Image (cartoon, rainbow, N blue to C red):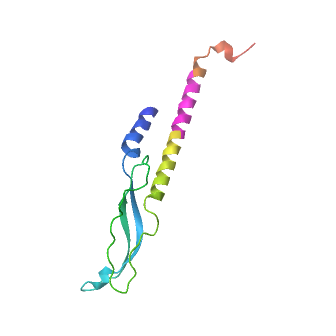
Amino acid sequence: MLLLYFVVLLTTWAFRPLDDSVPVGTDWTPTTAVPPEPQRLVSQSVECNTLFADQPRREPLPALTPQPDGRPALEYQREPCELVRTNAQRLFAINTVVVIVVLAILMLLAVRSRRPEASLHPK
């Protein structure tokens, strides 16, 4: 059952591309609408590579919305996919260690339960 969990984890999560939502700043384009709306903080969704890929993300990054004159351009506030990939690798490592520890405990219990009663209580 535990091995099945690990296989399902690999096939449904670890080999699928990751997604990252990266803050890019304040979008001022709604202020140019009629009637004007307030500016808003926005994030850009970026599709990343899988957990096991060599590079954290695919090139190029999605284009950001141009801003009205006199307003700062949107820009990625952090490196896309780095944090998501690092966290995913940590979670995968933790899951792997937990599976190995539980399997070791189960094997130890199986070996101990097969020992004859006499060897457990020496005279």
User: Residue 108 magenta-drawn?
Assistant: yes
Residue 29 is left or right of residue 92, and the answer is left
Residue at x-position 38% and y-position 84%: 71
Q: Quadrant of residue 72?
A: bottom left
Q: Judge by depth and name the residue closer to the eye, 28 or 68.
A: 68
Residue at x-position 37% and y-position 40%: 11
User: Residue 98 magenta-drawn?
Assistant: yes
Location of the N terminus (image quadrant)? top left
Q: Judge by depth and name the residue closer to the eye, 105 or 46.
A: 46
Q: Position of residue 6 (x, y in %)?
A: 44, 37
The magenta stretch is 97-110
Q: In the rendered view, tell whether residue 5 sits above or below residue 64.
A: above
Q: Position of residue 9 (x, y in %)?
A: 41, 41
Q: Position of residue 32 (x, y in %)?
A: 28, 85
**What secondary structure characterizes most of the magenta part?**
helix
Q: Judge by depth and name the residue closer to the eye, 110 or 4.
A: 4
Residue 114 is left or right of residue 123, and the answer is left
Q: Position of residue 29 (x, y in %)?
A: 31, 80
